[in-house]
Image (spheres, grey):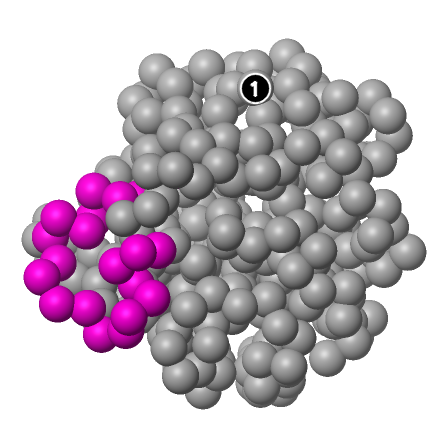
């Protein structure tokens, strides 16, 4: 594959403001970092929203509306709105923004799981906001709910919007869950599988796991039915994505997935991570796909058919 889709996950819902000053919190920060990431080579922008005052995850359309328009005006990148939100949100709250704005893409988590990041609390003595410590520490008790009913509800709620999904698969079973929905006719090719490695509660960041996830997807769906991408959490981000690109996969970077640019060095922005993976891809003989090329590969409806 000559062209590789680079997705940038700009802020997410797990990291908190204390963990990095670079993490975008306000609508202006999210818009500016998204635009810079697109200018650096990201074809898809995967977006969450945060309470501007505290940085806590929010699903409120009123907050999304403060940055979606600016992003659309200043870049042609594909906007991908989360339906994951955070592990503490009900599915109805996670879906609010997608329902309001009907983007070209949404993320869709393909199974329930433990979703934990509590070890990060041991490295922090002082927190910027009162909510952060309990949110992080209590993640040892989080179950990220994505039942078959929840998944079908999200798919059916957006069925008339022309929105396609980034199917987030944190483990092998999630591929089989996706196959179930393909069999039911709720997912049609070409679909976009985001294989996720290194989250505590999901599959580990080992090359053998990547190979087995990819071969299982090939067997379940056939190689021509899907596009696939890889993200890896934390310190595994760049090495693992390099391995995925060597195998022909697309890649996802961003401060949602890792706060670092190299071992022990915090990234200064999302754009810095995008620029690094683009440089690595080019050194391997690949080029980052443009938004137009990404839309063609994923058969998206186009940026003129969204409601923001």
Does residue 169 appear in this view? yes
For mark 1, give the secondary structure: helix
Q: Say if 112 sits above or below 304 in the image.
A: above
Does residue 1 appear in this view? no
Q: Say if 102 sits above or below 70 in the image.
A: above
Residue at position x 53%, y 68% from top?
58
In the rendered image, residue 36, in percent from the top left (x then y), is placed at: 41, 77
Residue at position x 69%, y 27% from top?
178
Side (left or right) of 32 relative to 119: right
In the rendered image, residue 223, in percent from the top left (x then y), is placed at: 65, 23
Give yes or no for residue 121 being in the magenta stretch. Answer: yes
Side (left or right) of 113 relative to 240: right
Tell me the magenta residue range: 115-135
Quadrant of the image containing the C terminus: bottom right
Q: Say if 162 sits above or below 27 in the image.
A: above
Q: Which residue is mark 1?
A: 173
Side (left or right) of 139 relative to 216: left
**Number of marks:** 1
In the rendered image, residue 120, in percent from the top left (x then y), is placed at: 20, 49
Give yes or no for residue 301 being in the magenta stretch. Answer: no
In the rendered image, residue 268, in percent from the top left (x then y), is placed at: 22, 71
């Amino acid at each position: 594959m000559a062209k590789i889709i680079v997705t940038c996950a700009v802020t997410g819902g797990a990291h908190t403001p204390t963990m990095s000053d670079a993490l975008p919190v306000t609508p202006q920060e999210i818009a500016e970092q998204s635009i810079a990431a697109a200018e650096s080579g990201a074809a898809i922008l995967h977006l969450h929203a945060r309470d501007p005052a505290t940085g806590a995850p929010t699903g409120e359309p009123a907050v999304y509306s403060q940055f979606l328009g600016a992003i659309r005006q200043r870049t042609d990148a594909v906007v991908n709105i989360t339906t994951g939100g955070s592990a503490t949100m009900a599915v109805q709250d996670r879906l609010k923004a997608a329902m309001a704005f009907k983007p070209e893409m949404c993320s869709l988590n393909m199974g329930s799981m433990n979703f934990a990041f509590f070890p990060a609390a041991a490295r922090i003595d002082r927190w910027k906001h009162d909510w952060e410590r309990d949110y992080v520490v209590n993640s040892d008790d989080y179950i990220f709910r994505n039942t078959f009913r929840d998944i079908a509800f999200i798919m059916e709620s957006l069925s008339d919007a022309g929105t396609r999904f980034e199917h987030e698969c944190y483990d092998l079973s999630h591929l089989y869950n996706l196959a179930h929905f393909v069999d039911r006719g709720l997912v049609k090719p070409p679909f976009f599988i985001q294989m996720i490695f290194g989250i505590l509660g999901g599959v580990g960041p080992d090359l053998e796991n990547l190979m087995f996830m990819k071969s299982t997807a090939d067997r379940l769906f056939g190689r021509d039915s899907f596009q696939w991408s890889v993200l890896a959490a934390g310190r595994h981000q760049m090495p693992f994505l390099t391995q995925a690109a060597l195998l022909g996969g697309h890649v996802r970077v961003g401060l949602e997935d890792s706060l670092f640019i190299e071992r022990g060095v915090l990234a200064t922005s999302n754009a810095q991570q995008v620029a690094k993976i683009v440089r690595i891809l080019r050194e391997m003989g690949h080029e980052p796909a443009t938004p137009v090329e990404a839309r063609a590969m994923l058969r998206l409806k186009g940026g003129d058919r969204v409601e923001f």
